[in-house]
Amino acid sequence: MGNLVSVFLIALGLSADCFAVAVSSSIALKKPTRAQILRVALSFGSFQALMTFLGWLAGRTVVELISGYDHWLAFGLLAFVGARMIRESMEHEKEEKKADMTRGFMLLVLSLATSLDSLAVGLSIALMQVNIAIAAGIIGITSFLVTATGFTVGHRAGSLIGKRAELIGGLVLIGIGVKILIEHLGG
């Protein structure tokens, strides 16, 4: 039972980036639909669970291969999406449709960026002697719920922030990337 509590706490920690990205995405979208929220929450939760499982499966080899630059990869992906949001916020209000970050390549990039830490966590879960299916399930479900909550919080904040919401959302994503860099380079 104690190990399951530990897995749940790990899941909350891993889902913190999902929450922050969901908040900034929701702010940028202004009025996300249920389908968009569900799509992002499912993607983030699935990626968190899958990366945990892959980390457990691959063992030390893959984790050691990317651990030297995983923080740079996460930073680069988040900075890319954040810069795109900032650029779109600077453009004058055009009738053209902006990129939907809840679909396709943008969703894939965000899902990957928020789940890289789960790869390393998968290895530590193997040491905890916990069933990996249960652990990955807890991590995936927690990330799903936290992401959906982030959209709700972001939607409410977005209505208060108004016109500059997309700019703020982009800056938040870049900030998350910088935070990841500082944590990994400083530690």
Image (cartoon, rainbow, N blue to C red):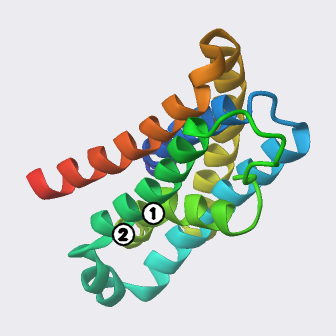
Residue 37, image x and y in percent? Answer: 79, 42
* Residue 135 seen in render: no
Q: Secondary structure at mark 1?
A: helix
- Rate crowding at label 2 as few (under 14), some (14 to 19) or many (20 or more) other CA atoms within 10 Å: some
Q: Is residue 132 left or right of residue 44?
A: left
Q: Which residue is pictured at 57% across the width and 58% down the height? A: 110
Q: Amino acid at mark 2?
A: Leu
| Farthest residue, direction top | 160
Q: Which residue is mark 1?
A: 77
In this view, 171 is above or below 30: below
Q: Nearer the viewer, residue 171 or 47?
A: 171
Residue 21, image x and y in percent? Answer: 55, 42
Residue 18, image x and y in percent? Answer: 55, 45
- Rate crowding at label 1 as few (under 14), some (14 to 19) or many (20 or more) other CA atoms within 10 Å: many
| Residue 118, picture quadrant | bottom left
Residue 109's tag is none
Q: Is residue 53 left or right of residue 42?
A: left
Q: Secondary structure at mark 2?
A: helix
Q: Is residue 99 left or right of residue 7?
A: right
Residue 146, image x and y in percent? Answer: 63, 37
Q: Which residue is mark 2?
A: 73
Q: Which residue is pictured at 57% across the width and 23% down the height? A: 164
Q: Nearer the viewer, residue 157 or 44?
A: 157
Answer yes or no: do the residues labelled 2 and 1 have beta carbons within 8 Å? yes
Looking at the rendered structure, the number of numbered marks drawn on it comes to 2
| Farthest residue, direction left | 186
